[in-house]
Image (cartoon, coloured by chain):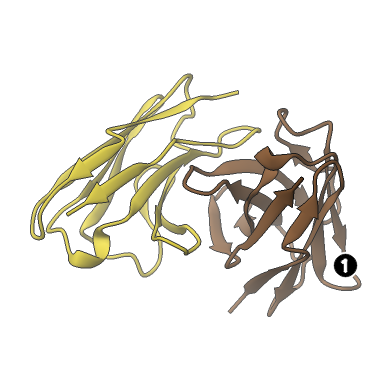
Amino acid sequence: DVQMTQSPSTLSASVGGRVTITCRASQSVNRWLAWYQQKPGKAPELLIYKASGLHSGVPSRFSGSGSETEFTLTISSLQPDDFATYYCQQYYNYPFTFGQGTKLEI
Amino acid sequence: QLQLQESGPGLVKSSETLSLTCSVSSASISSNNFYWGWIRQPPGKGLEWIGTIYYSGNPYYNPSLKSRVTISVDTSKNQFSLKLNSVTAADTAVYYCARFVGGSPYDIWGRGTLVTVSS
């Protein structure tokens, strides 16, 4: 199985700021990497697909980069609605695996 | 707009079988290149992939659950199902059903349903 490791686990930032979350895979997943946002009591929502593709309707302040084993999610100009938990997921091969999550706090 | 809705008992006794159904609306479960999956999230913890199925193919399961899990499709009802047997407290979680299009990640999720395993 491909292990996905996110860092940091918790991140504090301010409205208007910029943050970067890192996701590392235990082996190459090419660019088959997604990022999700999850708010309390809600289902995850897709933000980024194939490492850097912006899902429909997602604001352009979200961006993804990386390939093989190292990936980043960057959120620029943080808005109050962005404070949530973020997960990466590889869908290169089965079993699909998720990172442990990064909680973004004000 | 395709929607997914989980249904099933919210309380299951330890050692029994957890059974959930996901109803698909505004699309056919037999649509080309649509794959259907289950993901769970224990309270306060992260996401765990359970498995995925294509309407006409064999399911793929998380190896950690493979001996206890069955995912199936009912095309006549436009639904897919999850069965997890011999449950324990560790199986208490919010269970989500979701869809992905081949080559893409899960883009549509149900709202999730909390299943509690009681002793």
The image position of residue A74, as x and y in percent, is: 22, 46
For the N terminus of chain B, which image quadrant? bottom right
Residue drawn at x 81%, y 67% is B79
Relative depth, front residue between B14 and B82: B14
**B47 lies above or below B77:** above
Q: In which quarter of the view is residue A97 placed?
A: top right
* Chain the render paints brown: B
In depth, the one of A67 and A102 nearer the eye is A102
Residue at mark 1: B75
Report x, y in % for residue A103.
Answer: 31, 46
Q: Which one is nearer the viewer's eye here, A64 or B109?
A: B109
Residue under mark 1: which chain is it in? B
Q: How many marks?
A: 1
Local secondary structure at mark 1: loop
Residue beneath the point at 74% across and 59% down: B11
Looking at the rendered image, the quarter that the C terminus of chain B falls into is top right
